[in-house]
Amino acid sequence: MRMTGRIIAALFALAAAASSSLAQDTEPKKVALTYIIDHPAIDAARQGIVDALSEAGYAGERLELIVQSAQGSVPTQQQIAREFAGLAPDLMVAISTPSAQALQSVAGDVPVVFSAVTDPVGAKLVASLETPGGMITGASDMQPFGPTLDLIRSLLPDAKTLGVIYNSGEANSVSQVEALTAEVTAAGFEVVESTASQSAMVPDAARSLAGRVDAILIPTDSTVVSAIEGVVSVGERAKLPVFASDTDSVKRGAVAALGFNYYELGKLSGAMAARILGGESPASIPVGVLETQDLYLNPKAAEAMGVTIPAETLASAAVVVE
């Protein structure tokens, strides 16, 4: 049985189309990832993003990953964003609020996924958590301060003043301090603020609180968390307990933290990134938030800062740092 020239031509066309489709499926996706500064929480989120992409099949020859840190500099972050835009990637990923804002400003029609952004609405990244509405979505580390204030009260029953160190130039941090201020009265605290616009200024900001407050609470502020050791040093010398919102800070010397697992937060962002690379629009992917908070305790840090942790509190911790 002979095939006519028309049928043969049609079969060749189908084969060519299938080959083209296969090439598109196997062609590597270019993903550009940036973050404001190196510290354990951001490192964990970055690894979670990479692992989630790998689990979705974007690894090896299927992924071209470009990674750059701004090393704590907002101007450098903006320069990185412009460089990324010139690369015409399939997707850009940002860890932290200033990183997300920098990418959003240059993204055009390139989708952006963020991670570890506390208030994406307040930072003007998305229209709402439920319906982002643009070319950007991601995972937020927004968490209520009530449970943390209750924890501090249980460990320091006579405390009246709570110092908070933050970068007043970071929208993420300003939103957190506003939320904290709104909640402290019910817990019987007064907030005393101290600001640091650069990591090098954090120890001085901590020293300015010594003798004025009964404890220090560090929000999820990248500038301050990157220099948490400077705050811990002040806390140990002044017998001033240091609490954190970032659980990795407990491993670095804070007394305690109720917070998210940033590796899992990164995986949540990475899963969103994979969906967008697969063809979904970020406009219709709601901002993700982890539903559970873990208690991390550091008994040695507590002892150094004059805090006694009750046995029942130790028993309730997800992680006790030895």
Image (cartoon, rainbow, N blue to C red):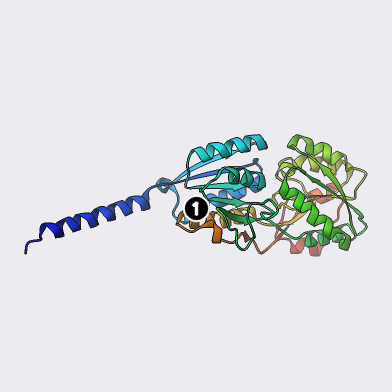
Q: Which residue is pictured at 28% across the width and 52% down the height? A: 19
Tell me the kind of residue under disc 1: Leu
Q: Which residue is pictured at 79% across the width and 49% down the height? A: 300
State which quadrant residue 268 falls in: bottom right
**Total labels drawn:** 1
Where residue 277 appears, as percent x and y from the top left, is: 47, 53
Q: Residues within 10 Å of mark 1 (few under 14, many from 20)?
A: many
Q: Which residue is pictured at 58% across the width and 58% down the height? A: 133
Side of 63 relative to 122 (left or right): left
What element does badge 1 sit on?
helix
Q: Identify which residue, 122 or 212, lies in the foreground.
A: 122
- From what the image shows, is residue 203 above or below residue 267? above
Where residue 189 appears, as percent x and y from the top left, is: 89, 57
Where residue 305 appears, as percent x and y from the top left, is: 85, 48
State which quadrant residue 127 falls in: bottom right
Q: In which quarter of the image is the N terminus?
A: bottom left
Q: Name the residue under label 1.
A: 53
Q: Identify which residue, 316 or 80, lies in the foreground.
A: 80
Where residue 5 appears, as percent x and y from the top left, is: 11, 56
Side of 285 relative to 15 (left or right): right
Q: Is residue 310 visible?
A: no
Q: Is residue 280 visible?
A: yes
